[in-house]
Amino acid sequence: MVKASKEAKVSLEQLKAVGNAMPGGFVMYTAAAPESIIYINKELAEIYGCDDEADFLEFTKGVFPGLVHPDDIMEIERDIVNQINSDNNDFDHVQYRALKKSGEEIFIDDYGRLLNTEEYGDVYFVFIQDITAMKKLQDENIRMQLQLEQERQLETVREEFLFHISHDIRTPMNAISGYTSLALNHIDDEESLRENLEKIKQSSNQMLLMVDNLLDINEMKKTEVVIDAKPRNLSKDIDALAELFVPLAKAKNISMRFDSTLNYPKLWLDLRLFQRIFHCILDNAIKFTEAGGNVKLYVTQTPAKDDMINTTFVIEDTGIGMSPEFIKKACTPFERELTSTLSGQEGVGIGLSVAKGFIDALNGVIDIKSSKGEGTTVTITLPFKQFIWKEKKKAIPKDCRILIVEDIELNRVIAQTVLEDEGFLTEYAENGKEGYEAVLNNEPGYYSLVLMDIQMPVMDGYESTRAIRGIDRDDAATLPIVALSANVGEDAIKESLASGMNQHIAKPFKPDQLIDIIMSYVE
């Protein structure tokens, strides 16, 4: 209920005279429901896109709520009543949206006053201006200010990222350069040479992990993660993690233990995603644990529905820990707590975010518990489908010949050496066209498998694969073709499979992994 005005009564004609003398729109309407409009001036009709007063009254149904956007009317009327009841004798002021007769949305600035008239009792007389242009200008200014602030923040993030990535890549690069010099200076000292080469290998793995993390976080923003699950023995894959990380922990004088209770070791598993997740987590555990500390990995399993096995990995360390505030954003890209920077540890702050992205893709969950100075516990649960197979002794078939299609000689020599040391026969082609012609010009079954690079002159790996698949003979469709490429993004993997390749292996490859994949096709 609006309280009555205490001012002396005024006549309607006096109010009209005041209103018409002011620039802009002017309206009078009764304070009592239904707030009927008594008078408007010509300018108000024009503001609302109406031809005249009659047109305006028909459009607004002759009541004040017709002036206000339907979504705003309750709030505006409540605001006006509150101002009237505040014992403030100043003009009441509100702003609201309105609709013109054409349906165009406009913004209205409304200054009103409640007075008691001789003819109608309590009446509002209101001065109205169309402030749409000013409102848009204000909104544009706000938008531009927000954009400038976002750009400033982005520039700060970019500068911090470049600083960290420069420092963190230079650290293993410096080690590689230094230990290479030491190895060359002591090339006749077998023990020293082996020790230096091991240091080079560790630093190379560290730098490769950084590069992989950067590529992974970029790919996860652009596209969905491709899951390529294959039958695996999880026990062996955990052993492979131990073989990689135990020496790294030992070099830092950290005790590292792996303890797994696997009742269901044989699972459908994407080895690439599995390795990326646990390389990130274990690398962090070692990185942020000081000499003399401990890192442990426990693995347990519980059966679920539809042959699914929930496998839980618990990684505990006695490292520097994280604050409760930082744990909330630990999986955000490029976030690094101050203590990690002060401790001089390598890392650009994307390991956990990469791991979290892959865990989400696998429908898993991650939980982090940590206290500053007391270490961190990361618990990861991943659902894997059980796979039952009979172990076979791996024996390379007689005359098993691998065609290596690779334009860089050093890469060819590495692949040939690894394969020939295992007992495979190898041949090579220097580009995709030569690779296609080698398959075309030899009898069916001559090659057991093709290792195909992607980026090559004359004809790239995608074109070569499509050309091979197009050869008019039975073996062209079944010959295993495996990409062996430094193109490791999700798009590259998708394109490899789309071109007709069977699988995609990233360079630099692990010899045991390469052999296992080849044997899965040629046994």
Image (cartoon, grey):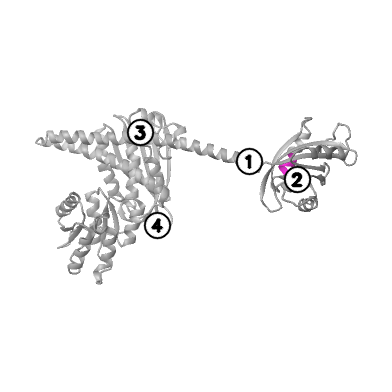
Observer-side mark, 4 or 3, equals 3
- Which label belongs to residue 163? 3
N-terminal-most mark, 1 or 3: 1
Q: With respect to residue 350, does 320 lie above or below?
A: above
The residue carrying mark 1 is: 135
Q: Nearer the viewer, mark 2 or mark 1?
A: 2
Residue identifier under label 2: 44
Are there few (<14), some (14-19), or many (20+) residues within 10 Å of tag 3?
Answer: few
Crowd class of label 4 (few under 14; some 14 to 19; many from 20; radius 10 Å): few
Left or right: 27 in relation to 398? right
**Residue 29 coordinates in the image, percent (x, y):** 82, 43
Residue at (63% x, 41% y) in the render: 135
Mark 4 or 3 closer to N-term? 3
Check if mark 2's residue and mark 1's residue have beta carbons within 8 Å. Answer: no
Query: Could you tell me how far apart the alpha carbons at marks 4 and 3 are, in whole angstroms?
Result: 48 Å
Q: Which residues are magenta?
A: 74-78
Report, in whole angstroms, how far the alpha carbon at label 2 lies from the one at label 4: 73 Å
Q: Amino acid at mark 3?
A: Phe
Q: Nearer the viewer, mark 1 or mark 3?
A: 1
**Residue 332 found in image quarter:** top left
Tag 4: amino acid: Asp
Q: Which residue is mark 4?
A: 307
Question: Residue 257 — which label?
Answer: none
Query: Which residue of the protein is positioned furthest toward the left in this rendering?
Result: 188
121 within the magenta span: no
Q: Residue furthest right?
A: 118
Q: Nearer the viewer, residue 146 or 373?
A: 146
- Element class at badge 2: helix
